[in-house]
Image (cartoon, rainbow, N blue to C red):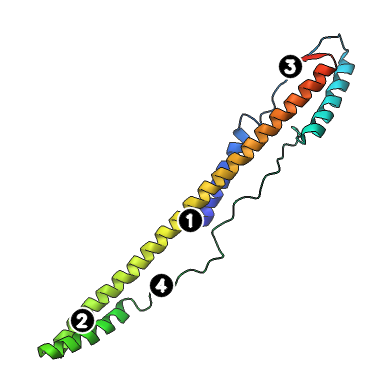
Amino acid sequence: MLGWSKGLVLVLCFALILSGPGLALAQSYVYPDKGQTQQQQDFDRGQCYSWAVQQTNFDPANPRVATGPPPPSFSGGQPQPQAPQGGLFRGAAGGAALGAVGGAIGGNPGQGAAIGAAVGGLFGMMRRARFAEEQQQQQQQQQQQQAQMQQGYAAQQQNALNQGRANYERAFSACMAGRGYTVR
């Protein structure tokens, strides 16, 4: 059950990262103020690209960021609590015993046992159903927490990429300006 939702969250996070405005290669407009030739412009761009990558540890051609590992999965590690044993039959047996005692006091142990078995079986089924409902709620809670952690991780990754790109752009612009270009 957790597999499909985890996969969906990962696909959505990946789509968010790819569609984010910070990842689209920003076009810097560079104007040669000093009449540099195309050959000189290409050389300067290459030099400034390398310098900006070195200064910022961010390469826009290969955008990667160093953040923490993805959030852990809730799929394992903790033992699952055991369901109440017996349910209907255990409750019926216990109820029959109590009903027989009550019926013996009232003068009809057979009728008391039958009523006790019916009531005990009903309580046993209710206990088992309540346990199953609690387990389902707990599993849904864990899935929601996992999805929230995945979304937080994706946002953290996106923010780190945006920051890396902004730092790179500032460094590249500074280098190009130092070589006699106007950069916008």
Tell me if label 2 and label 4 are in contact, CB under 8 Å.
no
Cα separation between marks 2 and 3: 86 Å
Q: Which residue is mark 4?
A: 83
Query: Is the residue 176 above or below the residue 165 in the image?
Result: above
Name the secondary structure under disc 1.
helix
Q: Which residue is mark 1?
A: 142
Q: Nearer the viewer, residue 126 or 172?
A: 172
**Disc 3 residue type?**
Tyr
- Pointer 2: residues within 10 angstroms few (<14), some, or many (20+)? many
**Disc 2 residue type?**
Gly
- Pointer 4: residues within 10 angstroms few (<14), some, or many (20+)? some
Cα separation between marks 3 and 1: 49 Å
The structure residue drawn at horizontal position 77% and vertical position 21%, both measured from the top left corner, is 173
Cα separation between marks 2 and 4: 23 Å
Query: Is the residue 28 above or below the residue 15 in the image?
Result: above
- Pointer 3: residues within 10 angstroms few (<14), some, or many (20+)? few
Query: Is the residue 40 above or below the residue 12 in the image?
Result: above
Quarter of the view holding residue 126: bottom left
Image coordinates of residue 179 in percent, x first then y, are 85, 17
Q: Earlier in the sequence, mark 1 or mark 2?
A: 2
**Disc 4 residue type?**
Ala
Tell me if label 4 and label 1 are in contact, CB under 8 Å.
no
Q: Which residue is mark 3?
A: 29
Image coordinates of residue 111 in percent, x first then y, are 14, 86
Q: Which quadrant is home to the C terminus?
A: top right
